[in-house]
Every structure is written in structure tokens, then in C-alpha cells.
Image: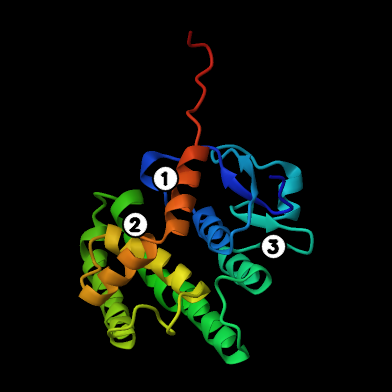
Amino acid sequence: MTSSVRITAFDWVPDFARGWVRDLRVRWALEEAGVPYEVRKLKAMGERPADYFAEQPWGQVPSYRDDQVQLFESGAIVLHIGRRFGGLMPGDEEGQARATAWTIAALNSVEPFVSQLPVIDVFHKGEAWTIERRPQVVEMVGKRLDRLSDWLGARDWLEGQFTAGDLLMVDVLRIARNSGVLTQPNLIAYVERGTGRPAFQKAHAAQLADFEEPVTEGVN
């Protein structure tokens, strides 16, 4: 099926990053909405094509376009998909506003804390300063997650139905789980519900399938 929707993604990333690049969020949203899409693959380790900076000012992924808009930033893209194609936004204005608030909360109130852990554990592993810094970050993350756990309680989703806010929050909490700091039972179950959705499974598989093995020139 030919699609008017196109996203960008990397053609290769190291093993530790596979399944974590943020085009996954956009793929997930499109799968929830039942919207087919095409992928423009970019080289992660090389210079971006000059025309790409007109789509994404910093040359990151993902960018997105359909027959109405061209966008960058995964949160903005997910909200647009929800509003235009459905599947991720309630039908009432208040519900849409609440879903938007949780989307921003995931990206602004939780992710900046959680995302420090992969920086410490992966990119600066073994460096002396991480011995002091990591416990401080874990404490900050724990306080944020405790508050989120209190809000979620026994609910399945943050606002009674799965929305764009849940999609982004689950993806952020995947980072916490992978870093070993997600300990709240209801949040663990929440992440499992989210990642167990067929749309997530399809999006995750699609991202992995798009990665290519690097070509080593001069080797027969």
C-alpha cells in the first residue's frame, strides 16, 4: 500500500541502541492508528544530507510528513497522529487536553531524569565521577516514579483509556526498567501492558527489521 506518511530512521545503530531510537514512538503511534508509512533511512554515523536540515533542524530522527504537515520532535508527531488519525486521543476536548498534558509530562517531568542513567551506565561507564553521581540520579528518579505510581494506582492507564500520554510515558519508563530502577509494581505492570500491545510489538519489530549490517569496504 502506498502511504502519504513518511518518517525518518537510522539505517544502523549499535546493538545497545536497537529498539530504543525514538522513531519507535512514531511507528507505535502509526500502528495504533492503523496508518501505513514509508521510511527514509539515514546513516547514523555520517553527515546528514543537506536537505534533511529543512525537516529536522538538528539532523536527528525522527522527522515526519504527511499530506498536511511536516514535523519533528517525537512528542509533537505522536500528538499530531492522535489528533488526525485517531486511536490515541479521547473524543472530548477535556480528554484531549489531559492526554496532551501527560505527553508533555512524560517528556518534561520524567524523561530528563530517567535519561541520565543510560548516559552514566553506557556512555560514561567506568568513569570515576559516575560513582558519586549515579546514586543521586537514582534518588531523583525514584521520587518521580513514586509520584507517578501514586497517581496511576490501580488504573490500567493514566486517564482511563490508552492515549498518546500513555504511549510516551511507557516508552520513557522502558528506559527506567532497562536501567534497573523501575521497582514500583504497578508501574512495572503498566509498562508490560503497554509493550504487550500489538501495535508496540509491530513497531518494535519494524524498527529492528530496518537496521542494516554495515558494509565493510575492501573485504571479500
Q: Secondary structure at mark 1?
A: loop
> Furthest-bottom residue in view?
94
Marks 3 and 1: in contact by CB < 8 Å? Answer: no
Mark 2 or mark 1: which comes first in sequence?
1
Q: Residues within 10 Å of mark 3 (few under 14, many from 20)?
A: some
Q: Residue at horizontal 26%, vertical 59%?
A: 130
The residue identified by callout 2 is 118
In the figure, residue 18 lies in which quadrant? top left
Q: Residue at x 30, y 78 (%)?
A: 145
Front residue (pair 152, 88): 88
* Residue 128 picture location, percent across and down: 23, 55
Mark 1: few, some, or many residues within 10 Å (few <14, many ≥20)?
some
Residue furthest to the top: 220
The answer to whether residue 3 is above or below residue 219 is below
- Amino acid type assigned to the residue bearing label 1 in the image: Arg
Res 187 visible: yes
Residue 57 seen in the figure: no
With 123 as the anchor, is 106 left or right in this view?
A: right
Look at the numbered disc 3 and give the secondary structure of its residue.
strand
Q: Which residue is mark 3?
A: 71
Q: Earlier in the sequence, mark 1 or mark 3?
A: 1
Cα separation between marks 3 and 2: 27 Å
Q: Position of residue 68 (x, y in %)?
A: 79, 64
Q: Secondary structure at mark 2?
A: helix
Quadrant of the frame with the N terminus: top right
Q: Nearer the viewer, mark 2 or mark 1?
A: 1
Q: Amino acid at mark 2?
A: Pro
What residue sits right under mark 1 in the picture? 18
Q: Nearer the viewer, residue 138 or 150?
A: 150
**Residue 80's disc number:** none
